[in-house]
């Protein structure tokens, strides 16, 4: 797919990253000693596949830790991101997510 700049891009769908969510890390038995390690590895894997011009739809349950933490995580992830609010994302309002 060509984006508006004529550069090839791809579309990705992802969900349930649960950045920073210790309860999910334990409940899902994710193989990381802590959430910081988990977050770094998800970011590394994301950025190893997604390019700057790619479009990523995140289908809910992005992160825990508040608006500033989510903004910080988004800035580290490649691609043009579109977030859909999941049930674990309800701690922020839709307006806060847009910001």
Image (spheres, rainbow, N blue to C red):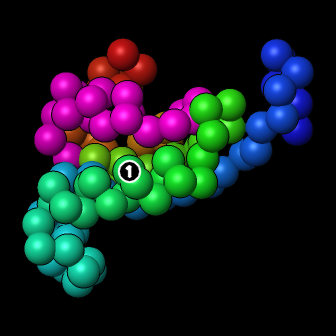
Q: Image point 38% across, 51% down: which residue?
A: 43
Residue 54 forms part of the magenta stretch? no
> Which residue occupies the foreground of this view, 70 or 90?
70
| Residue 70 placement: quadrant | top left
Q: Is residue 22 left or right of residue 98?
A: left
Figure quadrant of the C terminus? top left
Residue 79 horizontal/vertical position (percent): 58, 35
Q: Which residue is mark 1?
A: 43
For the question of whether residue 40 can be seen, the reply is yes
Q: Is residue 11 left or right of residue 21?
A: right
Decide: few, some or many residues near mark 1? Use Cα within 10 Å; few <14, some 14-19, many ≥20: some
65 w.r.t. 38: above or below: above
Give the secondary structure at mark 1.
Answer: helix
For the question of whether residue 59 can be seen, the reply is no
> Which residue occupies the foreground of this view, 93 or 62?
62
52 w.r.t. 42: above or below: above
**Numbered range of the magenta stretch:** 64-82
Residue 71 horizontal/vertical position (percent): 30, 27
96 w.r.t. 90: above or below: above
Residue 56 horizontal/vertical position (percent): 60, 42
> Which residue occupies the foreground of this view, 94 or 36?
36
Number of marks in the image?
1
| Residue 6 placement: quadrant | top right
| Residue 23 placement: quadrant | bottom left
Q: Image point 50% across, 48% down: which residue?
A: 47
Q: Is residue 75 left or right of residue 90?
A: right
Q: Image point 53% across, 54% down: which residue?
A: 48
Residue 71 forms part of the magenta stretch? yes
Residue 37 horizontal/vertical position (percent): 19, 61
């Amino acid at each position: 797919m060509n984006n508006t700049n004529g550069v090839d891009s791809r579309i990705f769908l992802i969900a349930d990253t649960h950045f920073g969510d210790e309860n999910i890390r334990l409940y899902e038995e994710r193989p990381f000693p802590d959430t910081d390690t988990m977050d770094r590895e998800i970011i590394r894997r994301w950025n190893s596949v997604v390019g700057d011009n790619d479009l990523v739809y995140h289908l809910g349950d992005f992160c825990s830790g508040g608006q500033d933490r989510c903004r910080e995580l988004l800035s580290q992830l490649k691609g043009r991101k579109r977030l859909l609010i999941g049930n674990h994302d309800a701690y922020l309002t839709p307006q806060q997510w847009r910001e």
